[in-house]
Image: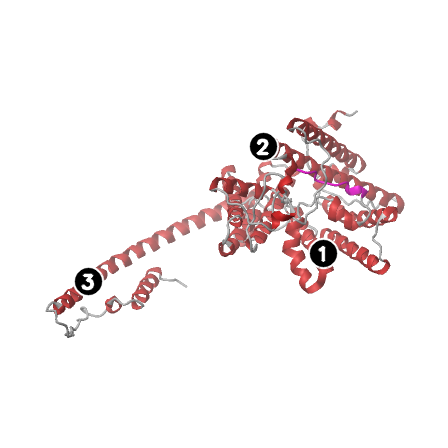
Amino acid sequence: MDVDWSEGATRAFNWAFNASHCPLSRVSEAPFPEKKLTPVATPRNNVHAIQDKSAMNDVLICGNFAQKRGKFRQILQILRSGVRSQYDRLASTSSRLDMQLYDSYGISPIAAQESVWLPKLVSHPDAHLALLTTLFPQCLHIELIVFLCYYATAVLVLMPGTRIVRLAILPLSLWIYAVAVTSCDPPKLFQDERFAYLNQARVLLYLLFALRTIVWSFQPKHFWRVKSRAEITPELYDTSPPKVRTTQLLVDALDLCCNWRGCGWNWSRHIPLPHETRSTKSTTTFAAATVGSLLLHLIIVDFSHYAMQWLAPSIAGSTKGASIFDAGLPPLTRYSKSTALTLLSTAFISCGEQAAYDSGTLIGVLVFRQDMSLWPPLFQAPFLCTSITEFWGKGWHQLLRDTLTSVAGKPLSVPFGRLGGVVGAFLLSGLYHSLILWGSGRGTDFVRITGFFVMCGVGIGLERMWRNLTGRRVCGWYGRVWGSVWMCGWAHIFVEAYAARGVFGSIFIPPSFRLTTYLP
């Protein structure tokens, strides 16, 4: 259906004038309506003259509008034809570009022609294409727009009375995140599948941006922060927020974007943070301890990856991927090997996250001069926890705790109770990690990944049932055995999903920087 834009604009103008008191609503009548003058009983002699002057002004205004309306209609026609020609030109160029990119990644021209627009909404999980990466600056534009949307919401949530504005721009922000995730794949520029995991990091960040944007948009009160954790007292949450300057507001918004646990913010009241184990007497000693932690965990990442490559070359030595369950081995040997791979994968993931956090700590403390108390340890001895509840509640990192509980945990706890909220948060976590795996361009495994997280929530529910029946918490050595068996058992399916898609065959550390490269 061809829509006449100029006719619609003209009708809109006529409707606007019909709603006003000006006689322009009858401008289409020929030639112009005469304005009858009614004598007014008044002692003054110039009443009729005033009314005559008013009528002449109305006629002059109406005449000018009649002349300008024709010109306005012509301008709209010109704009309409110009916009349509530019749209057709861009559509033709985009179609040719999409076809070339599809062909360069091994997609048949027929399939590409049938779904030129579809990957811009949701790209196929087995062919995550780089639709907008022919030139690297184009991809940088997308990254910049995504961060600006995220940053704008962070600025608004620090200002009182902006909830309506945040909710108004929420759909646009979510749409931009979706387009960026499904239409841009910068690691494709390397032309090496061993770097495909870098796009998983992009998907991880953009999904987190989307979830945090949702949380901030529905936040009834605005946020504020302090300069150190020493200023955080119970009275802080009940006092009025301090007034900040515009410059400080922009700096605080940047901190909010990067501060996932909310260290130093008024919204992180119920997030447990580990006790500091590094010396905080001086920045030098604190930075030295952080550098030591960074190097140590990088070495563990290197050796755990090397052990996986030695134990299962088909899994960690190639991006083709393979199952951790070797069907050619006897059952006992098969599951012993899969358990070893699961434990090595856990060490690899946790130490990799710690190394990344140590890098962020050094940047925050040394470059941005943040207080050392705002960078507490990431983990709190997770492998020494005596229950599943303690593992996920205190031991493991709490980077996603507030986001997951705000989006899924709290809403689902209303109809389904506290246990329903816990399972709902783990369900969202499973969906989140499933989409992260999808970012590598090799598909995903929703059942296995989400199943692992859901079963962790079920384990917490079983521990709560035990407490209700016996009146005692799950703790001690038996709690450690129970938690280890349950977590490690279900972690097999999580590792299987990633191993089958060749994620562990990626290049995480350049070979020239790996110590294991120089082993005999």
Which circle's residue, 1 or 2, is located before the other in the chain? 2
In the picture of the structure, the residue carrying the numbered disc 3 is: 63
- The CA span between labels 1 and 3 is 70 Å
Amino acid of disc 2? Arg
Q: Nearer the viewer, mark 3 or mark 2?
A: 2
Q: In this view, does 410 lie above or below 512?
A: below
Q: Can residue 323 be seen in this view?
A: yes
Residue type, label 3? Gly
Q: Which of marks 3 and 2 is nearer the N terminus?
A: 3
Q: Are marks 1 and 3 in contact (CB under 8 Å)?
A: no
The residue beneath circle 1 is 422
**Pair 1/2: label in front:** 2
Residue identifier under label 2: 369
State the extent of the magenta-drawn residues as a range: 375-384
Q: What residue type is labelled 1?
A: Val
* CA distance for labels 1 and 2: 37 Å
- Locate residue 402 relative to residue 26 in the image: left or right: right
Can I make out residue 108 in this image? no
Compare residues 403 and 467 and report the one nearer the observer: 467
Residue 19 position (above or below residue 157): below
Label 2 SS = loop
